[in-house]
Amino acid sequence: MQTHTDLELIEEIALKYPKKYKVYLLNDDYTSMDFVVDILMSIFHKSYEESEAIMLEVHKNDKGLCGVYTHEIAETKVMQVHKKARDNDFPLKSIMEEE
Ligand code: TYC
């Protein structure tokens, strides 16, 4: 009878449960509050109210969670934040961390 090798089992589990990554915004002294709210609505698809709450959380505590995604999507969100910030001359930073 055909049985699973350990490696096949690991691959099967990895396919079933892909790792997830938390994407955060970081505080700085120069990015405008309105711009951060716009980023949260346009890139992270948050409501205006939720965006304002996350922005204030970052402003007060230096870091705020914007969403949890697979690796490729998290990487894309971070890149989109950096591009939009750069295009608007703001130093806003975003980071991702394995969950
Ligand atoms: N601290 C900024 C200000 O006072 C606002 C801000 C909030 C900046 C969140 C970045 O991720 C951020 N204008």
Image (cartoon, helix red, strand yellow):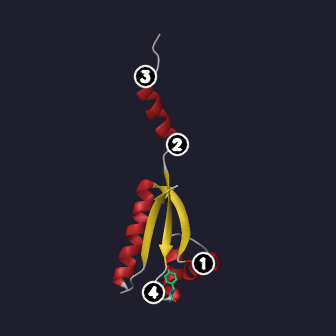
Q: Is residue 50 above or below residue 88?
A: above
Ligand 1 lies under 8 Å from the Cβ of mark 3: no
| Residue 25 x, y percent position in the rendering | 49, 73
Question: Which mark's residue is nearer the viewer, 1 or 2?
Answer: 1
Circle on res. 17: 2
Circle on res. 5: 3
| Label 1 Cα crowd, 10 Å radius (few <14 / some 14-19 / many 20+) | some
| Label 2 Cα crowd, 10 Å radius (few <14 / some 14-19 / many 20+) | few
Task: Please tell me which of labels 1 and 2 falls first in the chain.
Answer: 2
Q: Is residue 43 visible?
A: no
Amino acid type shown at disc 2: Tyr
Amino acid type shown at disc 3: Thr
Q: CA distance from mark 2 to mark 4?
A: 36 Å
Q: CA distance from mark 1 to mark 2?
A: 30 Å
Disc 4 on helix, strand or loop? loop
Q: Residue at coordinates 44% horizontally, 67% vertically from top-left?
A: 95
Task: Please tell me which of labels 1 and 3 falls first in the chain.
Answer: 3
Ligand 1 lies under 8 Å from the Cβ of mark 1: no
Mark 4 touching mark 3, by CB under 8 A? no
Front residue (pair 81, 30): 30
